[in-house]
Amino acid sequence: MSILLAVLASLCSLTLLLLVDVVSLGVFGGLLGGSCFLTLAISLIQAKPSLLWMLPILVGFVWVGFSVVTLEIGFYAPEIDTLTYATGASLRYFFLLEIFLWAAYFSFPDVRSLENLSEQENKRLVSAIVFFWIFLFIILFANGLVYGFPVLSGEQRFNYWVDHPIGSWLPKLFSYSAYLWLCGGWVLSKSRPGYGRVLALLAIFHIVFAVLYSNKASIFLVALFSFFAGYGVGRSSVRRKILSANQIVILLFSLFSILVLTYFSYHFVHGYDMQDVFGVMLRRIFVMQGQLWWAIDNCVSLDCASVGSDGLFYKGDGVYGIFVLMKEVMPDRMFEYYFNNKVPLTGGFPANLVFFSGFGGAILFCLLSGLLVGLFLRGLHVALCGHILMIFLYVFIYSSINWAFSLGSFNIFLNPLFISVLSIIFFSHLFLFCARLNCERA
């Protein structure tokens, strides 16, 4: 039944896409397209709960989708310094995401077919996570004592790290720690309740340091949805409900707390008046998230793109990655500020694919991207069944995938560290496969 509903949602989305050049659907078409995408995502997760591994990515897609639909109404988009209007951009956005999601669905594993960690292995995994976080918290605290905490001086984190002696790796390590909550959720879904107290204490420290380093909603949302992704998949693997009523209440309370923390960060860090903060947050949620997609879609539709694909997949001395797209659509002065401070816009996927190959090519690349993401996360699921070192390596891959598909910075896949970690994982699996083959022959 779930698959049938997913197929109907995709057919409805395709029909709307074919009608967009015939009938002016405007924001109504965008809302229908968004409803089809949500129906598809929920139906596929019901059919194969392991798709919950993609929860942080899916939440980002939905967030950008809300913004893209809002831009169909007609809005002023600050970063691209232009007015928007109804173009059918939202329907094209949701259709490409549906292609991506279907491909991921077919390459994901069935969580019920894999073994679970023993209690001893759970204990070792929790110990490894706790050790990592304590090590990170000590570094962050020592750094704050030496260089100061940005929130205490009212400094934004991007400006704080740009000339920092260890700013090239410490913020990345902190971002990586947010994705480790994936393992925390997985362990908690299968272990004694006592682990919950340990993880709750770690969560408090994580929140404190995130606030001290002027992080806003993004890192909190990544940690929260990574936790519930691991927890939901863990529960579904033993045929339990993904979330109970109490856990839904906890999730809603956590989202409310993130909203409150973000509200005060805009006031104390960014200097907005209290009465203006709510309007700024609404603009951030409903306008700024989708403006990059809208601008690239509009640019490609009008055949005015001039940069092409150079730089999208490498990081050199010039403009690279998602900044290639930003340079195409942003005013020069504004782009220079964002590029110098290494602040990317969100919603870069699948805008990067459309910019790279047009709408036709983007369909093929979304299909291939979904298959590859499914294969990577299949490996993560296998690693969570007992290989602690591999778990940490796969979480790095997981964080890179989320970064790439949330922001569109595919150049991360050619990063030497990413390639090195991927090589270690590949040769480890190859070694284990050969060893198993030799045992069977013996």
Image (tube, helix red, strand yellow):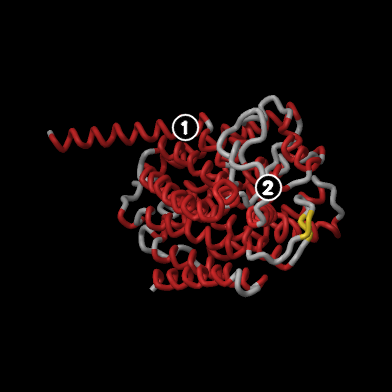
Query: Nearer the N terminus, badge 2 or badge 1?
Result: 2
Judge whether residue 161 can be spotted in this image. Answer: yes
Cα–Cα gap, marks 2 and 1: 25 Å
Location of residue 183 in the rendering, given as x and y in whole percent from the top left corner: 47, 46
Residue 30 appears left or right of 38: right
Residue 385 appears left or right of 321: left
Judge whether residue 180 can be spotted in this image. Answer: no
Nearer to the camera, 122 or 368: 368
* Residue 6 against residue 170 in the figure, above or below: below
Location of residue 264 in the rendering, given as x and y in whole percent from the top left corner: 77, 52
Quadrant where the C terminus sits is top left
Mark 2 = which residue?
A: 345
Mark 1 = which residue?
A: 419
Location of residue 249 in the rendering, given as x and y in whole percent from the top left corner: 58, 65
To which quarter of the image does residue 290 belong? bottom right
Q: Name the secondary structure under disc 2.
A: loop
Q: Residues within 10 Å of mark 1 (few under 14, many from 20)?
A: some
Residue drawn where x is 54% and y is 45% of the image: 179
* Residue 141 against residue 200 in the figure, above or below: above
Q: Residue furthest front?
A: 303
